Protein backbone atom coordinates (compact mmCIF):
# COMPACT_ATOMS: atom_id res chain seq x y z
CA UNK A 1 0.00 0.00 0.00
CA UNK A 2 2.89 2.35 0.71
CA UNK A 3 4.21 1.73 -2.81
CA UNK A 4 0.83 2.58 -4.33
CA UNK A 5 0.63 5.81 -2.36
CA UNK A 6 4.16 6.69 -3.39
CA UNK A 7 3.37 6.09 -7.08
CA UNK A 8 0.26 8.29 -6.89
CA UNK A 9 2.19 11.08 -5.16
CA UNK A 10 4.95 10.91 -7.79
CA UNK A 11 2.48 10.98 -10.66
CA UNK A 12 0.78 14.06 -9.18
CA UNK A 13 4.11 15.86 -8.76
CA UNK A 14 5.11 15.09 -12.35
CA UNK A 15 1.69 16.06 -13.81
CA UNK A 16 1.27 18.15 -16.92
CA UNK A 17 0.41 21.85 -17.06
CA UNK A 18 -0.69 24.14 -19.90
CA UNK A 19 -1.23 27.89 -19.92
CA UNK A 20 -3.46 29.92 -22.22
CA UNK A 21 -3.58 33.69 -22.22
CA UNK A 22 -6.35 36.17 -22.85
CA UNK A 23 -5.53 39.77 -23.75
CA UNK A 24 -8.02 42.14 -22.13
CA UNK A 25 -8.56 45.54 -23.76
CA UNK A 26 -10.72 48.20 -22.12
CA UNK A 27 -11.52 51.46 -23.90
CA UNK A 28 -12.37 54.19 -21.36
CA UNK A 29 -14.35 56.86 -23.15
CA UNK A 30 -13.12 60.41 -23.30
CA UNK A 31 -15.32 62.83 -21.38
CA UNK A 32 -15.15 66.41 -22.62
CA UNK A 33 -18.33 68.29 -21.72
CA UNK A 34 -19.74 71.71 -20.97
CA UNK A 35 -23.12 71.88 -19.26
CA UNK A 36 -25.01 75.17 -18.83
CA UNK A 37 -27.78 75.20 -16.23
CA UNK A 38 -30.13 77.06 -18.59
CA UNK A 39 -30.34 77.80 -22.27
CA UNK A 40 -32.33 81.02 -22.25
CA UNK A 41 -31.83 84.17 -20.23
CA UNK A 42 -34.59 86.73 -20.55
CA UNK A 43 -33.75 90.12 -19.08
CA UNK A 44 -36.68 92.12 -17.68
CA UNK A 45 -37.87 95.17 -19.63
CA UNK A 46 -35.47 98.08 -19.41
CA UNK A 47 -35.68 101.76 -20.25
CA UNK A 48 -33.24 103.65 -22.48
CA UNK A 49 -30.31 104.84 -20.35
CA UNK A 50 -30.84 102.13 -17.71
CA UNK A 51 -27.91 100.17 -16.26
CA UNK A 52 -28.53 96.58 -15.15
CA UNK A 53 -26.08 94.55 -13.09
CA UNK A 54 -26.12 91.07 -11.58
CA UNK A 55 -28.07 89.50 -14.43
CA UNK A 56 -29.36 87.00 -13.44
CA UNK A 57 -29.73 87.55 -9.72
CA UNK A 58 -28.59 84.96 -7.17
CA UNK A 59 -25.46 83.00 -8.12
CA UNK A 60 -25.62 83.48 -11.89
CA UNK A 61 -25.48 81.08 -14.83
CA UNK A 62 -23.76 77.85 -13.73
CA UNK A 63 -21.36 76.37 -16.27
CA UNK A 64 -19.93 72.95 -15.40
CA UNK A 65 -16.89 71.59 -17.24
CA UNK A 66 -16.02 67.86 -17.09
CA UNK A 67 -13.04 66.08 -18.58
CA UNK A 68 -11.01 62.95 -17.96
CA UNK A 69 -8.32 63.56 -20.59
CA UNK A 70 -5.59 64.44 -18.09
CA UNK A 71 -4.66 67.60 -19.98
CA UNK A 72 -4.81 71.32 -19.10
CA UNK A 73 -7.97 72.99 -20.39
CA UNK A 74 -9.37 76.49 -20.76
CA UNK A 75 -12.87 77.92 -21.01
CA UNK A 76 -13.54 80.88 -23.30
CA UNK A 77 -16.59 83.11 -23.82
CA UNK A 78 -17.91 85.34 -26.61
CA UNK A 79 -21.16 86.40 -28.18
CA UNK A 80 -21.92 85.34 -31.72
CA UNK A 81 -23.44 88.73 -32.54
CA UNK A 82 -24.12 91.95 -30.70
CA UNK A 83 -27.55 92.40 -29.11
CA UNK A 84 -29.70 93.00 -32.18
CA UNK A 85 -33.31 93.71 -33.11
CA UNK A 86 -33.55 94.02 -36.89
CA UNK A 87 -31.25 96.91 -37.82
CA UNK A 88 -31.02 98.14 -34.22
CA UNK A 89 -27.95 97.16 -32.18
CA UNK A 90 -26.82 97.52 -28.59
CA UNK A 91 -23.03 97.48 -29.01
CA UNK A 92 -20.84 94.96 -27.20
CA UNK A 93 -19.21 97.90 -25.44
CA UNK A 94 -22.46 98.06 -23.42
CA UNK A 95 -22.75 94.32 -22.64
CA UNK A 96 -20.41 92.76 -20.04
CA UNK A 97 -19.62 89.39 -18.46
CA UNK A 98 -18.09 88.60 -15.07
CA UNK A 99 -18.66 86.08 -12.29
CA UNK A 100 -17.11 83.88 -9.66
CA UNK A 101 -15.73 80.41 -9.08
CA UNK A 102 -17.59 77.44 -7.69
CA UNK A 103 -16.30 75.77 -4.52
CA UNK A 104 -14.56 73.02 -6.54
CA UNK A 105 -12.66 75.37 -8.92
CA UNK A 106 -8.90 75.66 -8.31
CA UNK A 107 -7.60 77.28 -11.50
CA UNK A 108 -7.20 80.88 -12.65
CA UNK A 109 -10.38 82.96 -13.10
CA UNK A 110 -10.29 85.95 -15.44
CA UNK A 111 -13.80 87.24 -14.73
CA UNK A 112 -13.46 89.04 -11.40
CA UNK A 113 -14.02 92.39 -13.12
CA UNK A 114 -16.68 93.02 -15.75
CA UNK A 115 -15.37 92.77 -19.31
CA UNK A 116 -17.15 93.83 -22.47
CA UNK A 117 -18.22 91.02 -24.76
CA UNK A 118 -16.36 90.46 -28.00
CA UNK A 119 -17.16 88.46 -31.11
CA UNK A 120 -13.88 86.56 -30.64
CA UNK A 121 -13.54 84.04 -27.79
CA UNK A 122 -11.66 85.37 -24.74
CA UNK A 123 -10.22 83.40 -21.85
CA UNK A 124 -12.39 83.11 -18.74
CA UNK A 125 -10.72 80.22 -16.88
CA UNK A 126 -7.56 78.09 -16.94
CA UNK A 127 -7.67 74.76 -15.12
CA UNK A 128 -5.43 73.76 -12.24
CA UNK A 129 -3.50 70.47 -12.38
CA UNK A 130 -6.08 68.90 -10.04
CA UNK A 131 -8.76 69.60 -12.69
CA UNK A 132 -7.05 67.88 -15.64
CA UNK A 133 -9.22 64.90 -14.72
CA UNK A 134 -12.22 66.29 -12.83
CA UNK A 135 -14.76 63.62 -13.77
CA UNK A 136 -17.44 62.94 -12.53
CA UNK A 137 -18.08 66.17 -10.55
CA UNK A 138 -16.50 68.66 -12.95
CA UNK A 139 -15.61 72.28 -12.24
CA UNK A 140 -18.34 74.86 -11.58
CA UNK A 141 -18.03 78.43 -12.86
CA UNK A 142 -20.71 81.10 -12.42
CA UNK A 143 -21.34 83.85 -14.97
CA UNK A 144 -23.25 87.11 -14.57
CA UNK A 145 -23.90 89.94 -16.97
CA UNK A 146 -24.23 93.72 -17.02
CA UNK A 147 -26.04 95.81 -19.57
CA UNK A 148 -25.85 99.55 -20.09
CA UNK A 149 -28.67 100.48 -22.45
CA UNK A 150 -27.76 103.61 -24.46
CA UNK A 151 -29.95 106.66 -23.72
CA UNK A 152 -31.09 106.88 -27.35
CA UNK A 153 -31.74 103.15 -27.86
CA UNK A 154 -34.75 102.26 -30.02
CA UNK A 155 -37.40 100.01 -28.49
CA UNK A 156 -37.36 96.36 -29.47
CA UNK A 157 -36.61 92.80 -28.39
CA UNK A 158 -32.83 92.49 -28.69
CA UNK A 159 -31.20 89.06 -28.96
CA UNK A 160 -27.74 87.55 -28.96
CA UNK A 161 -26.13 84.18 -28.31
CA UNK A 162 -23.41 83.72 -25.71
CA UNK A 163 -21.06 80.84 -26.52
CA UNK A 164 -18.76 78.95 -24.15
CA UNK A 165 -15.80 77.14 -25.75
CA UNK A 166 -13.73 74.44 -24.04
CA UNK A 167 -10.21 73.90 -25.38
CA UNK A 168 -7.21 71.76 -24.42
Image (cartoon, rainbow, N blue to C red):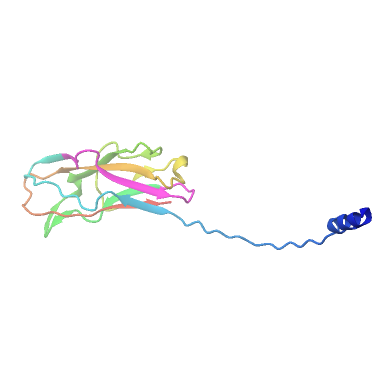
Q: Which residues are magenta?
A: 53-73
Between 66 and 24, the one lying in front of the other is 24
| Residue 153 position within the rendered picture, expressed as x and y whole percent measured from the top left | 7, 49
Which residue is at a point 30% across and 39% down the rendered structure image? 111
Which residue is at a point 20% across and 52% down the rendered structure image? 40
Would residue 64 be visible to someone looking at this image? yes
Compared across the picture, whether 62 is left or right of 11 comes to left
Of the 4 image quadrants, the one containing the N terminus is: bottom right
Would residue 121 be visible to someone looking at this image? no
Answer with the quarter of the image where residue 102 lies.
top left
Answer with the quarter of the image where residue 51 lies.
top left
Answer with the quarter of the image where residue 89 lies.
bottom left
Between 141 and 38, the one lying in front of the other is 38
Compared across the picture, whether 20 is left or right of 69 comes to right
| Residue 95 position within the rendered picture, expressed as x and y whole percent measured from the top left | 19, 46
Is residue 67 located in the magenta-colored stretch of the structure? yes
| Residue 80 position within the rendered picture, expressed as x and y whole percent measured from the top left | 25, 56
| Residue 162 position within the rendered picture, expressed as x and y whole percent measured from the top left | 25, 52
- The number of numbered discs placed on residues in the rendered structure image is 0
Compared across the picture, whether 11 is left or right of 126 comes to right
Is residue 61 located in the magenta-colored stretch of the structure? yes
Most extreme residue toward the right is 3
Between 13 and 97, the one lying in front of the other is 13
Which residue is at a point 19% across and 39% down the rendered structure image? 57
Amino acid sequence: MNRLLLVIVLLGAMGFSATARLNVVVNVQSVYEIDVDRYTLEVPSVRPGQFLSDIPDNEGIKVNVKTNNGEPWQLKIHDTMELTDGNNVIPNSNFYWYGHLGANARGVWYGKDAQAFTLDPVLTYSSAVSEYNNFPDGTDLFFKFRLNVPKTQNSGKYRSIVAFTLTE
